[in-house]
Image (cartoon, rainbow, N blue to C red):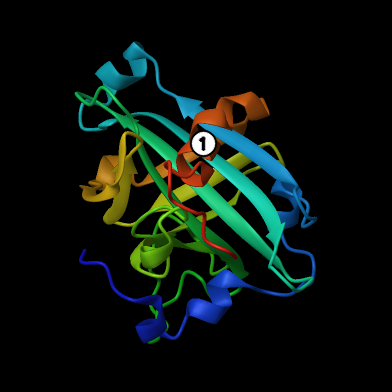
Amino acid sequence: MAPRSLATLGLLAAFIAWPAQAATPLDELIQPEKDNSACFQRIYDAAHLRQHPKQTTTAITVWLRYETMRGTSDLALGFGIAISRRRDALPFFAQGDCNWDEKANRDVGGRRLIDTLNKDQAAVCMIYARPDVFDALSAQEGGHLMFDRGKDRDTLMLYLNDSMIMVKRARRSEQLDIKFAADDRVFLLRRTDPKNCAAVENAVTEPEPGVAPRQR
């Protein structure tokens, strides 16, 4: 998927800032308050990977954090993700902004976007083509994904599209178009200790020397 400008989709305002809304299942995963964060993770053992040879994902971590927009009281839900894959020594990272959408799983024609998500509502996230620390490219789209609360407040269901722009930590300025086949599109993650999201937080928030972080 080639990166496209969020502005051309008319979605920039919706995904960069959104005011307080009515309670949603998303609130059970993370309360919409400034600086609140949550960490969800799944690490697959060797037995699982042997039973699912077409699955390339070996581990996946999601970091959520609420921030206020500069100069306003509006909240924005930041999203960070790390994915480890077979035959890749280092994980891939991506970052974006999320919003709860009552029609997230329907296209403009009313058709279901993700069959395995058997409802319309979900949190939809627009992914940046490069992390927030690269100011010049922060509004460039790198794909999208959806997630929802699982059976309880400590589980998260993640639904990936067929591709997403991601980066490696050592070379975050390099865009990598990562493809996801059918066995790497739906994941059930569980709440975990916040320290397990430290690598994700660092990869999407720590600027390189001489690079100023984007002002939200």
Determine whether 73 is above or below 55 in the image.
below
Q: 80 or 169: nearer the eye?
A: 169
The x and y percentages for residue 12 are: 49, 78
Q: Give the percent coordinates (x, y) of residue 116.
A: 42, 54
Taking the spot 35% from the left edge, 67% from the top edge, the residue there is 141
146 or 210: nearer the viewer:
210
The residue pinned by badge 1 equals 202
Quarter of the view holding residue 24:
bottom right
In which quadrant will I find the N terminus? bottom left
State whether residue 192 appears in this view.
no
Residue at image location 49% in from the left, 61% down from the top: 125
In the rendered image of this protein, does residue 10 appear above or below residue 140?
Answer: below
How far from the left and from the top, in percent, is residue 84?
Answer: 34, 30
Residue under the point 57% across and 41% down: 63
Q: Locate the C terminus by quadrant.
A: bottom right
User: Could you say which quadrant of the image residue 52 lies in?
Assistant: top left
Q: Please, is residue 76 above or below residue 168 in the view? A: below
Label 1 secondary element:
helix
The answer, for residue 40, to whether it is visible in the render is: yes
The structure residue drawn at horizontal position 70% and vertical position 47%, both measured from the top left corner, is 29
